[in-house]
Image (tube, helix red, strand yellow):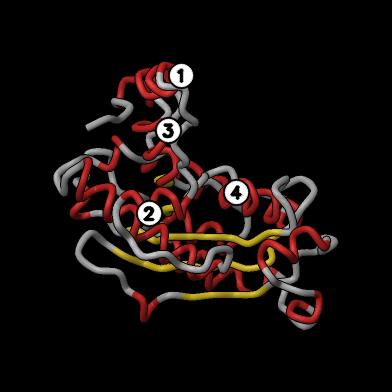
Amino acid sequence: MLYLGPDKQSATVPDWPIHLAKLAEQAQDPRLQQFYQAGAITADTPLAEVPFVALDFETTGLNPALHGILSIGLVPFSLQRIRCAEAQHWLINPRKHLEEESIIVHGITHSDISNAPDLDSILADLLDALAGRIVVVHYRQIERPFLDTALKSRLREGIEFPMVDTLELEARLHRNRQAIFIDKLLRRPHTSIRLADSRARYNLPYYQQHHALTDALATAELLLAQVAHRFSPDTPIGELWV
């Protein structure tokens, strides 16, 4: 098993239950207050007892300061069960220009979002689905930064929450110093840690990419495979979250 131990994470990862309690006191918007008041599990909680929710965004680009959220997909799950019946998907108005390059990636067009609601109108439902759960993403530089930026522009306050990044878990195995040294020694390219390629290593089926709901489901399945192969149900969540 390869992971960053708690001693290496403590400098950057907050004590999430305490941190969310402080944010609940500071939040001004009632929806954010309620979200933070749901709290978080403690770092020593075993993965078998963790309530997860896989989250994926499609966006107009990769820079949260310049681009906006187009669609949101989420799937609640645990190590025992993926709750597809509770999955949710929204198309939303990004408040940003929809460029041709992004349309080619995700297939969401101007007509698709012409009557889409603003994020503010579905925010209560989104936060309710995330509250009290550990958010799971593949590449954490999208969902949390984009949602934080979007809320700051609408509410003048952002958002924070604990996450597990399945890409980062793959990077621990395939992008550590030993793996990089071996790749250089053998003159081979680095192992891809993209979502589809990571899933293939665990013999998970291929799904069409760049649909927020499908990618959320794909991410949930990937985490279950990672835990089954490299961790255990007794592994504390503090060894995975960021």
Q: Which circle marks residue 14 in the picture?
A: 3
Instruction: Describe the element under mark 2 as helix, strand or loop.
Output: helix
Would residue 219 appear left or right of 113 to someone viewing this image? Answer: left
Quick one: label 4, few (<14), some, or many (20+) residues within 10 Å?
some
Q: Amino acid at mark 2?
A: Arg
Residue 1 placement (x, y as % from top left): 21, 32
Q: Residue tagged by mark 1?
A: 184
Q: From where the camera sits, is residue 21 visible?
A: no
Separation of residues labelled 2 and 1 (CA atoms): 24 Å
| First in residue order: circle 4 vs circle 1 | 4
Question: Disc 2 or disc 1, which is closer to the eye?
Answer: 1
Residue nearest the observer in this picture, 18 or 199 = 199
| Residue shown at the point (42%, 64%) measured from the top left | 206
Q: Residue tagged by mark 2?
A: 199
Instruction: Describe the element under mark 1 as helix, strand or loop.
Output: helix
Would residue 15 appear left or right of 100 to someone viewing this image? Answer: left
